[in-house]
Amino acid sequence: MSNLDLNSLLDGFPHEPGQVKARKIIGIDGREKVQLRIDLGLIQMEMNGRPDGQRPFGFESLLQYHQARVQSAESRGSPYELSEAELVALQQESVQYYHRYLSLFQLRDYPNVIRDTQRNLELLNFVSKYTQEDESKWTFEQFRPYVMMMNIRARASLEIQEGNAGKAIRLIEEGKQQIEKFYRSVNQPEWIESSSELAFLNEWLHEVRENIPLSPVELMERDLEKAIAEEAYERAAELRDAILKMSRRIPDESVDP
């Protein structure tokens, strides 16, 4: 009889309260997988497709299954609405993707965090469109600021990793505006001040600006954006010319070939 005790798997992979502990492994099927340590063991997820490896109704995910059903219904001219049971199943599926992108973020696998957060944002849009009850919609929508924040963190972190500090800063600024727009769209502008997602992005934005120096071109690009916003068009034209000249400049013309 094989030994089913998990302790051998958990040795050297301790649970730490308040910390996301994750690792990638190669499964017995030869495919890469992600493991997330939890207090009573671990969660193992596939790297691609639905995290539990299932293919509901032959589709990669329940979301894709319902998207296909919408297309079929619309071709017949029929309306489509998600039932309460279908919403519960979709929410359970979204939690799987949440566990995976949280693990992948800890592992700095930013491209796949972007993939999974965009997927869950797509789910939120789908539920909002094909659900009539506001309460049922809010069961999903309440998580939109968090998913947006994680998507922004992954996209900006990838730019920082590639040395594009200026672009990272713009992504964070744009992300903040998108989250603020969401709060206004649900008639809760006062939540902007208490949002933990916005508080994190504000703090991170300050840190990025303080610790990652911008190149001369990036500094001028920021000044250009400010000049346009202030309608200082003469200054904006000067900055455009300067950016163009600097972008075309040969690195060191004094060095002999």
Image: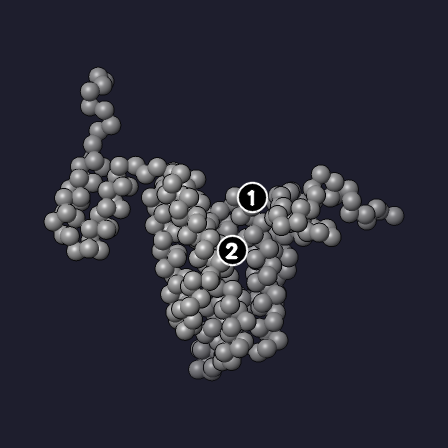
The x and y percentages for residue 166 are 33, 44
Residue at image location 74% in from the left, 52% down from the top: 40
> Is 176 on the left-hand or right-hand side of 38?
left
> Which residue is nearer to you in this view: 75 or 87?
87
> Is 97 on the left-hand or right-hand side of 224?
right
Tag 2's secondary structure? helix
Question: Pointer 2: residues within 10 angstroms few (<14), some, or many (20+)?
Answer: many
Which residue lies under the disc numbered 2? 116
Circle on res. 107 = 1
* Cα gap from disc 1 to disc 2, whole angstroms: 14 Å
Give the residue type that dot 1 points to: Leu
Count of numbered badges drawn on the protein: 2
Tag 1's secondary structure? loop
Disc 1 or 2, which lies upstream in sequence? 1
The x and y percentages for residue 102 are 56, 52
Q: Which label lies toward us, 1 or 2?
A: 1
Circle on res. 56 = none
Q: Is residue 147 visible?
A: no
Q: Are marks 1 and 2 in contact (CB under 8 Å)?
A: no
> Which residue is nearer to you in this view: 4 or 176?
176
Residue at image location 18% in from the left, 44% down from the top: 240
Q: Is residue 15 visible?
A: yes
> Is 187 on the left-hand or right-hand side of 140?
left
Furthest residue in direction left, as rendered: 234
The x and y percentages for residue 73 are 48, 78
The x and y percentages for residue 32 are 61, 45
Furthest residue in direction top, as rendered: 256
Give the residue type that dot 2 points to: Asp
Relative to 87, residue 93 above or below: above
